[in-house]
Image (spheres, helix red, strand yellow):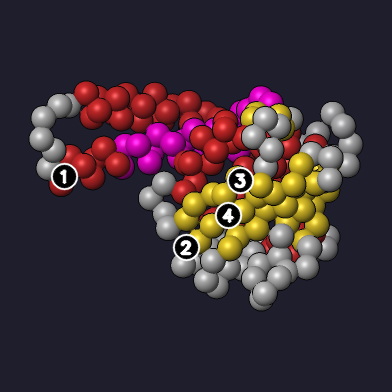
């Protein structure tokens, strides 16, 4: 069971995504239907509408109602909401393309990706590798990449400070703990950020 505060946050996010998702999708669709030569303002509007639509889809899956079991392609589509409009990309090449990830693990993966994108102050790549049997590794790779300080503190059982920039950390810790997913920071290589290992401790 999730803590009451986390469950409340998920419910609020689900409601916000529901109320905002329809208008955002309608706006994106309407802009796509506008034919003819575009100008800079229209191009910016289209890009902004697309980013808003994808971002809402991501938050719905990662923080709100969650999602079902997902393949790598579906995870890539949801994670697109993180990287659009940012100097970041997600590399899923080391994941088995036909693998199916259970819903609770997919949600934890998305939250870990959210934490990783915030760990890239000057842009970079969020890399994922591994499998459900041996564990999944996620790490930010880029100039100055560093996990939020609250992540190591939370993994050590210490209090995690709450602020808008690192709100994904307590969500990741709570969702993982309630889903039987163990989180470990591995040894970093070449001075970069250490991989975060997600291991299914129990089978739901």
Based on the picture, tell me whether residue 188 belongs to the magenta stretch: no
**Image depth: mark 3 or mark 1 in front:** 3
Closest to the observer, 40 or 175: 40
Residue at the (23%, 45%) spot, across then down? 44
Q: Quick one: label 3 or label 4, which is nearer the N terminus?
A: 3
Q: Is mark 1 on a helix, strand or loop?
A: helix
Give the distance between the C-alpha atoms of the residues marked 2 and 1, in whole angstroms.
25 Å
The residue that label 1 is drawn on is 41
**Image depth: mark 1 or mark 4 in front:** 4
The residue that label 4 is drawn on is 126
Give the distance between the C-alpha atoms of the residues marked 2 and 3, in whole angstroms.
19 Å
Q: Quick one: label 3 or label 1, which is nearer the N terminus?
A: 1
The residue stretch that appears in magenta: 48-69
Q: In which quarter of the image is residue 186?
A: bottom right
**Image depth: mark 2 or mark 3 in front:** 3
Q: Percent position (x, y) of residue 88?
A: 47, 55
Q: What element carries label 3?
A: strand
Q: Quick one: label 2 or label 1, which is nearer the N terminus?
A: 1
Residue at the (87%, 32%) spot, across then down? 203
Task: Tell me: residue 199, above or below residue 150.
Answer: above
Based on the picture, tell me whether residue 55 belongs to the magenta stretch: yes
**Image depth: mark 3 or mark 4 in front:** 3
Q: Is mark 2 on a helix, strand or loop?
A: loop
Q: State if disc 3 and disc 2 touch (CB < 8 Å).
A: no
Q: Residues within 10 Å of mark 2 (few under 14, many from 20)?
A: many
Give the distance between the C-alpha atoms of the residues marked 3 and 4, in whole angstroms.
11 Å
The residue that label 3 is drawn on is 93
């Amino acid at each position: 069971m999730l803590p009451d505060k986390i469950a409340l946050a998920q419910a609020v996010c689900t409601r916000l995504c529901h109320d905002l998702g329809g208008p955002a999708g309608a706006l994106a669709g309407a802009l796509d239907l506008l034919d003819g030569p575009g100008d800079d303002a229209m191009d910016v509007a289209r890009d902004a509408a697309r980013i808003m639509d994808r971002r809402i889809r991501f938050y719905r899956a990662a923080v709100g109602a969650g999602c079902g079991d997902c393949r790598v392609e579906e995870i890539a589509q949801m994670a697109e909401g993180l990287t659009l409009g940012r100097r970041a990309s997600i590399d899923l090449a080391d994941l088995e393309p036909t693998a199916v990830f259970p819903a609770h693990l997919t949600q934890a993966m998305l939250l870990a990706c959210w934490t990783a994108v915030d760990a890239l102050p000057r842009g970079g790549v969020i890399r994922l590798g591994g499998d459900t049997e041996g564990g999944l590794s996620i790490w930010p790779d880029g100039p100055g990449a560093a996990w939020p300080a609250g992540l190591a503190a939370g993994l050590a059982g210490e209090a995690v400070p709450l602020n808008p920039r690192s709100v994904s950390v307590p969500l990741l810790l709570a969702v993982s703990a309630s889903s039987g997913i163990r989180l470990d920071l591995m040894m970093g290589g070449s001075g970069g950020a250490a991989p975060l290992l997600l291991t299914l401790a129990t089978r739901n």
